[in-house]
Image (cartoon, rainbow, N blue to C red):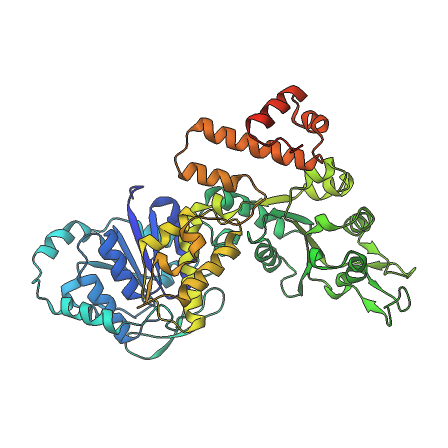
Amino acid sequence: MKVLDVALICSGSPGFLRSLGSLLAGRCRLMECYSIPEATQMIQLHSPDYSIFDVRSCSPQQLSRTFATIANLKSGQAILICIPNQLTADRIPHEISTFCRIIDLSNHDENYYELVEAILSPSEKAADITSERKTLDPSSTFESATEASIDAAPPLNAKHPPSGGDEVEGSSSVGRETKVPAIELEGMADRFRTRTPELRTMLRRLEIAARHNVTILLIGETGSGKTHLASLIHEMSLRSRDPFLHVACGALPGELIESELFGHVKGSFTSAHADKDGKFLVAGNGTILLDEIDVLTPDQQVKLLRVIETGEFEPVGSNRTLTVKARIIAASNLQLQPLVEQGRFRPDLYYRLNTLSFTLPPLRKRMPDIEPLARYFVHRHATQLGIEVMEITPEFLECLHQYPWPGNVREMENAIRSAVIYSREGRMTPDTLPTHVVDCISGPANDPSVAAFFAVRKGESLENRIELTEKDIIEQALLNNNFSRTNTAKHLKISRVTLYNKMRKYGIMPER
């Protein structure tokens, strides 16, 4: 298959889209949709080389609409993914029998790499598709059937089989109940819904660590998906049947963090009216996520280090030593090394956590993930809100790609939920998005790459981009060193004169 080939996958199952799409992603330009009306629109716009339809749970009416869409293909191959005995020769209309191939999913339910090879393998019928299409009568009944199907086809929020794990009930082409084989997701990278090669490589390493009883550190901006990733680590570990507990350290008052984590005994402080078990005991044999560990005080960091090293701790006000049985995952919105250099984070805890540290890149550095995530969120919120969404326009997706998303995946999901609410006539267009997204006016962000994102999009020169980055680095260094020019110059390994000149050049001299 050529690199520039385009493949369209149409399925009502998000799990199937993620699993199959992740394996096809490196071999073609991939498009995904959840309904036949949207597939029809995308086929008309992009003329894909491969149109893959998951018909395992289609009703007879939905199957007819699929056939009608295939009959109007102008180029490329159509591939139907079905279950055993669902599509026999007598159930495929003769008019499209040379247009499509049928792949029985049960033949590949243990190795989806083989399923991909079966999809992409050359077909003897493929060579004759163009000539066969030319012989079709333009007034074919399937053409009129397609027009009717677009009006009658179910919207994106129609009920579909759920993704992942369990078998689901569905209707075969003859209307009887049958078991639809569920897709076993390939791994953490697929379940995290990423198509970014660097992130997929990192997640494969993390998946190996997840299977062992080790403490893991996750670093990433707010909203980038650390909590979701921690839950995947838990689900893929031997502790998956035990509790997963999320503790947001940043949301707890500093004086109560120890009580929340380690528990306390009655009378240990003013409001301690009874004994209380801490989160480490409540988690049992499961997993505990300590989010925003950078807010812990040095004394609290010492106690956490002891828990990680020995598994031992004492509740507040008690001399009784207890043992932690839960697995610990730590997370931070900030890189910890600068905090160590500033004396805000203990080096011994840092080096203990940094052994198995994984950095989750922000969404603006995961551009291949934006379109599949957007389609997933549109489908999800259209279903939850009961709103019919029939089409996601290219202009809508282009707006999503032009915005740097300082709030990351969480911000994009909220923007898409709002867009679904304001959609009209079942279309997702730019004017349904929040105005700041359309106008590319991003909110506050600590990372200089947000500003650099706009510089790259505007096509600024390399020199200007370098200067922009240098200015951000100097401003951040000044902030970290309490605006001491001497300490800032030492930190940046430049002279004070050079620092002074650059500050004057970039207009960041303090006012007198």
Q: Could you tell me which quadrant the C terminus lies in?
A: top right
Q: Where is residue 225 in the image (x, y as percent from the top left)?
A: 56, 54
Q: Determine the residue located farthest toward the bottom in the rendered image.
A: 176
Q: Nearer the viewer, residue 105 or 187?
A: 187
- Identified at 80% across, 51% down, the residue is 300
Residue 406 vertical placement versus 378 (above, below): above
**Left or right for 485, reference 220:** right
**Left or right for 357, reference 397:** right
Q: Position of residue 267 (x, y in %)?
A: 91, 68
The tally of labels here is 0
- Identified at 82% across, 68% down, the residue is 276
- Identified at 27% across, 65% down, the residue is 37
Q: Where is residue 22 in the image (x, y as percent from the top left)?
A: 42, 51
Q: Position of residue 50 (x, y in %)?
A: 27, 53
Quadrant position of residue 81: bottom left
**Left or right for 510, reference 313:** left
Q: Nearer the viewer, residue 205 or 272?
A: 272
**Left or right for 199, reference 265:** left
Q: Could you tell me which quadrant the N terminus lies in?
A: top left
Residue 144 vertical placement versus 237 (above, below): below
Q: Can residue 145 be seen in this view?
A: yes
Quadrant position of residue 143: bottom left
Q: Is residue 495 visible?
A: no
Q: Determine the residue located farthest toward the front in the rendered image.
A: 512
